[in-house]
Amino acid sequence: MTELTVSEGKNHSNNLLRRDVRFLGNILGEVLVHQGGNELLDIVEKIRETSKSMRSVFLPELYEEFKQIIDKLEPDNRHQVIRAFAIYFQLVNIAEQNHRIRRKRDYERSAGETVQPGSIESAVQDLKERGFSYQEVQEIISELSLELVMTAHPTEAMRRAILDIHKRISEDVMQLDNPTLTLREREQLREKLLNEVITLWQTDELRDRKPTVLDEVRNGMYYFHETLFHVLPDVYEELERCLSKYYPETDWHVPTYLRFGSWIGGDRDGNPSVTADITWETLRMQRKLAIREYQRILQELVQYLSFSTTIVTVSNELLLSILEDRKHVTLKKTQAWRNENEPYRVKLAYMMEKLNNVLDESKKGTKERYDTPEQFINDLKIIDASLRHHYADYVADICIKKLIRQVELFGFHTATLDVRQHSQEHENAMTEILAKMRIVDDYGSLSEDEKIKLLDQLLNDPRPLTSPYQQYSDSTKECLDVYRTIYRAQQEFGKHCITSYLISMAAGTSDILEVMVFAKEVGLFRKESDGTVICTLQSVPLFETIDDLHDAPRIMRELLSLPIYREAVTVMNDVQEIMLGYSDSNKDGGVVTANYELRVALKEITATASDFGVKLKFFHGRGGALGRGGMPLNRSILAQPPHTIGAGIKITEQGEVISSRYSLKGIAYRSLEQATSALIKAAINARLPEDNVNEEYWDNIIRNMSEVSLKKYQDLIFNDPDFLTFFRESTPLQEVGELNIGSRPSKRKNSNRFEDLRAIPWVFAWTQSRYLLPAWYAAGTGLYSFYQDKEENLKILQEMYKNFSFFRQLIDILQMAVAKADLTIAKEYASMIKDKAIHDRIFGQIEDEYNLTRDMILKITGQQDILDDVPVLQESIRLRNPYVDPLSYLQVQLLTELRELRNQGEDDPILLREVLLTINGIAAGLRNTG
C-alpha cells in the first residue's frame, strides 16, 4: 500500500512527501503481514489494484470482478481489510500534515527577503505600501478582534488514544528530514515507527461508550495544553516584530485581538447532560489547566533566573515584594529557595505557591493567593523591570514577556465559556414562574407584542420574580440554576469566564428578553435606583433558519428600540453579539440560498444596528463540512462583507477541524498567522472599499437565482413525500447515530421529523454515501435560471466570477463539493432503497441536478474539468478516490446485511462494528465527516 502520492513532482519538496507516504505504506505492509500473514497483504493489494483500474477505465467485467472480491471476503478477513484501508488513510493524512509544515519551512529557508503570501508580514507590508500612517495602523490594530470558539459538535470520529498515536508518529516522521541522523539512528527510527503502527493496528478505533461532557471538556483542553498555550503568544510576537520593522516609531505591544473561547460544558441545547453542575466543573477544570501551565513555566524559569546579588543589583521593588510575600505566604521547607543571594528564585517560589492557592477557594481574598490574573501579571512585571535594571533585557524578552502575554490571553480561566440553550426552554420556565407568581396565567399563549410589553416591564421592575418558598419543576430549577452558576462563576473566576448567553432558534424579540429577565433575577443585570445599569451577561440571538434570517433585522430594531435593553448594550461598550447559523440555514434552504440570505442578513442587521449607534460582533457558526459552511479559517474571515466586521468576529471550530488545525504546533501557527493576515486585510478592505458599480445589479441576479434554487431544493427535501425514505435507506444515517462520537443526541427531540434532525448527522450521512448533497444540490438549477443558454448571460456570470468576490466564493465552494461528490459510488448506496420507483425517480433528479451543476460551474469558470484551477487538490481527490472506494462498497454490503437482520428482529454487534469501522475509514479518506 504505497502508491497514494501526489503526481510526479517537479521539486524536491513533493519528492519528500512521496518518500514519507511510501515509507509509511511499506511499514503498514509489514504490519499486515505480521498481523494477518501474506494472505492479508495479498487480498488488500488485489482490492487496491482492482479499484485503481476501475477508476482508470470503467469496464463492466472489472466491476463484477471487484464486487465478487468484496462479496467473497470472510468476516475475519473483511474486518482486517477495512482496518487496513482506514489506517492507511490515517498514515497518509499524517504525512500530508507534516508536508504542510515542511513546505512552510522550505519557503522561509529559500525565500530570503521575499515575504510569504498569507503571512503576517505580507499584511503589514501591504499596510505600509498602501500609505497607512503609523497612527492609522495603531487604530486598525486596536480594532482587530477574532475569537475562535471550540465546540463539542460530534464530528470528530477518532478517539483521543488514536490521535495521541498520530501525534507520536508525526513527530517521528519529521525526524526523517534530519540530515545528521546516522544509519543506526535511522534504523532505530524505523523500528520505533513500526512499533507505533503496530500499536495503532492493535488499538481499538471505536469508543465503547459515548463520551461524557467532561470527557469532551478534557479533549478540548488537550489542544490548549499541547499547542495553543505555546503557539498563540508566538503569533502576537510575530505581529509585533513586523509592526516594529515597518513602523519603528514606537515599541509595539499589540492588544489582545486573537483569543479562544469554548462551548464545551456550556452548550446545553438538546443535551440534557450539560447541567449547571457540569458547567461549574468545566470552569474549575479550565482554571486548573491555566494554573498548572503557569506553575510549570515558573518552574522552568527557576533554571534561567540564577542572577546573584553578589554580582548584580536588583530593583528595590523586587526586594520589597519578596518581603511582602514572606508576611503572608507560608512555604514548606522543600518549596523555599534557600540561597538568599538569588532573589528571583526566592520570588518564583512564592509565586508558585500563590498560584497553587488560587485553586483553594477558601483562601479567596487573602494575600496568600492571586485573586486576579492582573495580580500575577504585576509580579511578572516587577521581575521584568528588575531584569532590565541590570541589563538582562534578553532574558526578560525571552523568559518573561511571553509569560505575561500568556496570562493576558488565558487568564485564570483558559477560555471564555459560552452558554447556549434553546429558546423554548426559556419560554417554558418563564411560563411556569409567571403563573406561580400570578402575573399571567399562561405566558406561552400571549402574542409576541404582549410578551415584549410584559418582559420590558419586568426588566424595569426591581422586584424579584422567584421565591425560595415556591416549588418549581426540575427543568425550571435547572434553568434558574444555570444563571446562578454564571453569577457565582463571575465572582470566582472573573467576569470574563462567561459573558455570552446564546439562544438557539431565536425567532422573536421575546426570546432575547427572556434571557435578560432571568439574568436580572440572579444579579447579572439590574438597574440601580440612581438609573445606573449593571450588566455582565449579554443575550445573544442565534438566527438559524431562512425565516429567522429574514426576521433578524426587524427583531434587532424592535429590541434596540427598548430603552432598558439599549442601556444594557451601552454597558457592553455599545457592542451587540449576534450569531448566524450556517448549518441549519443550509439544511433549511440549500447552499445557494443559505449563502445569499446570510450575506443579506449581515448587511441589513449591520445597517439596523448602525441606526442605534450599536456595533455588531457577528458569531459565525461554521462546521467543518462544505454543507455546514466549512472553509479555511482565513477564507472564512475574508468571505464576510468588510464593513460587517466592525466590532470583531467569532467563528466556531468544530470536531475534526479542531484536531486538523491545532494538533500540531506548526499547522496551528500557520492557521492563526493566516487568520491574523486576513483580519488585517479585511480592515484594509473596510477602509478602502472597492466601488463596483455592478454590485447592485449582480446582487439582484443572485437574489433571483436564490429564489429558484430554494424552490428546487425544498421541492425535493420538504415537499417530496418519499424523500425521507430515500435519505434513510440510501445513507448510513441510523448507523452514524450509533458511532459514539459525542455526548449530544443526534435529534433535538425524540422524533423522526426532518425538522428535528440536527444538521451534523444530516451532512455526515450524505458525506459518507458520497452524495455530498447538502453542499451543491439545487445550485445548478439556480445558476441555469439566469443563463438560459444565452451567451450574453454567460458572459455576465463569467464577469461576476472574475470581479464579484461573493459569487466567486460561492462557485468555488460548489466546485469543491462537486469534485468530492461521486455519484457512481452514491448509486451503490441508492441500491439499498427497497422501492425501485422511489429509487429511480429521486436518484434520477439528484443525478440530473449534479450534472447540471457541474456543467454550469465549467461554463462559468471556463475550465475543462472541475478544480483545474487548484491542481494540487484535484490530484489529491483523484488519487484518494480509488482507496476510499473499497470502503464504500464494503459499507454498502455491510449495511445491507445488518439492516436485513434488524428487519427480522435480530442484531449482530460484530456486523455493526464493521459498519462503524468503515465510517471511520471513509471519514479519514475524505478528510471530512459532518
Image: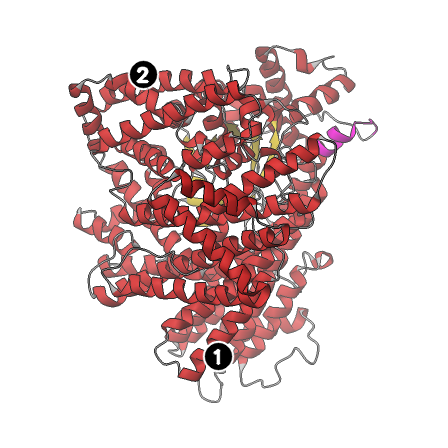
Residue that sits furthest to the front in the current view: 61
Q: Quadrant of the N terminus?
A: bottom left
CA distance separating discs 1 and 2: 64 Å
Along the line of sight, which residue is nearer the eye, 827 or 313? 827
The stretch of residues the image draws in magenta is 469-479
**What residue is disc 1 on?**
188
Residue 647: which quarter of the image? top left
Looking at the rendered structure, the secondary structure element under dot 1 is helix
Q: Is residue 257 at all visible to an observer of this figure?
A: no
Hey, what amino acid is under mark 1? Gln
Q: Toward the viewer: 117 or 486?
A: 117
Q: Residue 742 appears in which quarter of the rendering? A: top right
Cβ–Cβ under 8 Å for marks 1 and 2: no
Q: What amino acid type should be assigned to the residue bearing mark 2? A: Asn
Q: Is residue 849 visible?
A: yes
**Could you say where residue 148 lies in the image, as x and y percent from the top left?**
46, 45
Q: How many marks?
A: 2
Please give the label number shown on residue 231.
none
Q: Is residue 98 magenta?
A: no
Label 1 neighbour load within 10 Å: few <14, some 14-19, many 20+: few
- Residue under the point 45% across and 33% down: 771
Which residue lies most toward the bottom here? 310
- Between 582 and 905, which is closer to the camera in this rendering? 905
Question: Residue 659 in the image: x percent, y percent?
Answer: 50, 52
Q: Give coordinates of residue 2: x percent, y percent.
A: 41, 61
The residue under label 2 is: 704
Q: Secondary structure at mark 2?
A: helix
